[in-house]
Amino acid sequence: MKKWCGTKLVVLLKLLYFSRRKINSNRPMNSLLKRYASKSEAVFILLPSGLIQECNDKAAELFGFNTSMEMKGLSAADLVPADFQQYFPAEITEEHLTDGKYLPRVNKTKQGLLFPTEVLTYFKIWGDQQYVLVHIRPTKSEQIETLLLKQNIDVLNSELSRERNQNSEKQQEEIFHRLGTVFPQLTSRDMEFCCLLMKNYSSKQIAGCLNITLEGVFAARKRLRKKLNVPAGGELVAFLHVST
């Protein structure tokens, strides 16, 4: 009898633990939503994949849902016009964000009605997960067709920018590898400087990228020439290209 009661107590305690754990798992989302939610605009918390994790009541009202719970698990792509869905990114990256400002967009209600909006998007780290916060407010603009065209152009430009950045990163990795093989004496900072030189960045651009002064750029050039034994009168950039 005592053994049976003890077993039952253990089972009840486990059920209580896991039910509390399930409730607590939503607390970070709720805390994040409360921190950034607004009564005057819809606020969404998305995964980079576009999956809706949380939203406020204003979001449900604006998009024609009965409650915000109905929207959880949907994709942000479900809230945009059909012709825009084909351009919706598989993963939201820095290039797809609105750069700290509200941009004109067109959204779609649950019933399929299109309406003009202004949208602000940005990344937020919570715990060890990166989320996309989206603020949407309705506008009175009636130029839906013009907004649709601009919206499609904007996302296509974002995709092109993302591809260029990916290619640039790949190119930089290749240059780093070649430099490290040919000149093992270079530090990672040296290689970063060399990479910018080999991309034909100006001294002013290099100063901006590395957060140093123009004098710092000239000093770095001088140190590199010495470290790489560049012949007197030799062009540093040409030497790097020939050597690697």
Image (cartoon, rainbow, N blue to C red):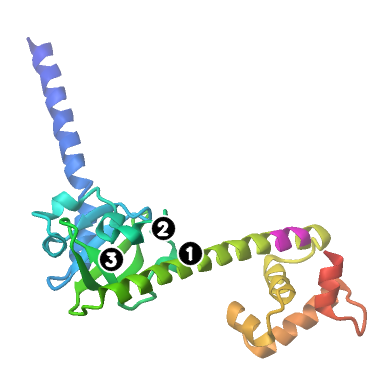
The answer to if 175 sits in the magenta stretch is yes
When asked about the image quadrant of residue 175, the answer is bottom right
20 or 35, which is in the foreground? 35
- Please report contact status of discs 2 and 1: CB closer than 8 Å, yes or no: yes
Q: Position of residue 124 (x, y in %)?
A: 34, 64
- Residue under the point 79% across and 82% down: 222
When asked about the image quadrant of residue 206, the answer is bottom right
Query: Is disc 3 placed on a helix, strand or loop?
Result: strand
The answer to if 219 sits in the magenta stretch is no
- Quadrant where the C terminus sits is bottom right
Q: Which residue is mark 1?
A: 159
Q: Which residue is mark 2?
A: 89
Q: Position of residue 149 (x, y in %)?
A: 36, 72
Q: Is residue 234 above or below residue 8?
A: below
Q: How far apart are labels 2 and 1 at the CA level? A: 8 Å
Q: Is residue 242 visible?
A: yes
The answer to whether residue 155 is left or right of residue 137 is right
103 or 216, which is in the foreground? 103
Callout count: 3
- Residue under the point 63% across and 83% down: 205
The extreme top residue here reads 1
Q: How far apart are labels 2 and 3 at the CA level? A: 15 Å
Residue type at mark 1 is Glu
Query: Is disc 2 placed on a helix, strand or loop?
Result: loop
Residue type at mark 3 is Val
Q: Which residues are magenta?
A: 174-178
- Residue under the point 38% across and 59% down: 88
Q: Main secondary structure of the magenta part?
A: helix
Residue 134 bears which disc, if any?
Answer: 3
When asked about the image quadrant of residue 46, the answer is bottom left
The answer to whether residue 22 is left or right of residue 99 is left
